[in-house]
Structures are given as C-alpha cells and as structure tokens.
Amino acid sequence: MYMSDKNLTGSRAVVLEAWEVDRLSTRQSIYASSLAGGMSGGTVAAFVRGRSNIIPGMIVFSLFGGLGQMSYNIVSSSRRAAALNSDQISTPSFLQKLASKKWIPMKSLSNEEYEGMLQDKLIKVEAEIALLDEDIAALKAKENVNTSRDQRTETS
C-alpha cells in the first residue's frame, strides 16, 4: 500500500491502484481525492436521486474531495514544519492551552497531582470502610446481647 495513505476510502484506493504510483505529490493527491469524490458522489446521487443528478453529484463531491485534500495538505505541511521547529521551542498543545484558561472548568493535571488525588480518595474510602466495620461489630455485639437476654427470659 502507499506510505502516506494508510486510511483510504474505497474509491480513492481504486484510483491510486489504477495510477500505480508509489508516492503521491500534493497535486496528485488532490487529483486522486477529487476523482474519488466524483465517483462516490455520482454513485450516491444515482442511487438516491436518480440518473439526472449524477453529473451535479460528481461535480459537488469532486469539489468536496479536492478542497478537503487541499486543506489536509496545508495542515499536514504546517504540522511538519512545526515538528521541525519543535526542537527549538516547546509550545503547549491546543488542549493544554484550552485547559489553562480560567473560564474552562477543567484543569490539566500532572501525573503527581493525579496520583495525589487518587491517594486522597483511597484514604477516604478506607476510612469509610473502617467506620462500616465498626458499625457492623457494634450491631453484632448488640445482637449477641439481645440473643443472650432472650435466652435468659426463655429459661426463667
């Protein structure tokens, strides 16, 4: 299969297999996505809305496929450039930036903070278990006293 195309749609895989290309350029990937979108759009339009909508479906979905691939290429190249520059500057991810805002009800935790929270919860649960054990022991003692009192009244 192709290195950069691990998650292919069926129609795009057919186009790439027909072209017999080992590695796609950005322009070729846009063409392949447009062609695959057109094939898919025409097929769906034929089944859903009839023969008269095949051409408009092909045109619209070709545009969707091409523009989507173009957008993906732009984002991918900017991420690649950012990865090359990441050695110099370590910037927080989008989610880390979002979690650092005051108006967001979430907080980004380090592993140590999370472990501390879990330890606190464990201590609380253990304390509740100890209290319940004491209550159970008190109830058993009360039951033993009641049964011994009942046995004394029966024998007298």
Image (cartoon, rainbow, N blue to C red):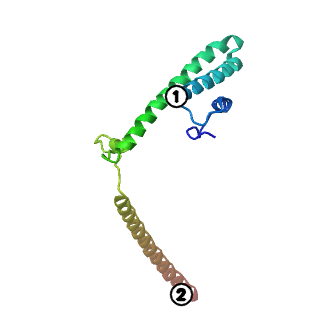
Question: Where 140 sits versus 103, above or below?
Answer: below
Q: Quadrant of residue 61?
A: top right
Rendered residue at 51%/82% (across/down) = 144
In-image side of 72 versus 120 (left or right): right
Q: Residue tagged by mark 1?
A: 69
Expressed as whole percent of the image width and height from the top left, the position of residue 71 reads 47, 28
Expressed as whole percent of the image width and height from the top left, the position of residue 97 reads 33, 42
In-image side of 82 versus 24 (left or right): left
Nearest the eye: 139 or 34: 34
Expressed as whole percent of the image width and height from the top left, the position of residue 119 reads 38, 65
| Secondary structure of the residue carrying numbered label 1 | helix
Looking at the rendered structure, which numbered label has been put on residue 152? Answer: 2
Rendered residue at 48%/31% (across/down) = 73
Question: Where 137 sits versus 1, above or below?
Answer: below
Expressed as whole percent of the image width and height from the top left, the position of residue 45 reads 66, 18
| Secondary structure of the residue carrying numbered label 2 | helix
Circle 2 crowding by C-alpha within 10 Å: few under 14, some 14–19, many from 20:
few
Could you tell me the amino acid type at mark 1? Gln
Nearest the eye: 47 or 33: 33
Disc number lying in front (2 or 1)? 1
Could you tell me the amino acid type at mark 2? Arg
Q: Is residue 14 visible?
A: yes
Nearest the eye: 115 or 60: 60
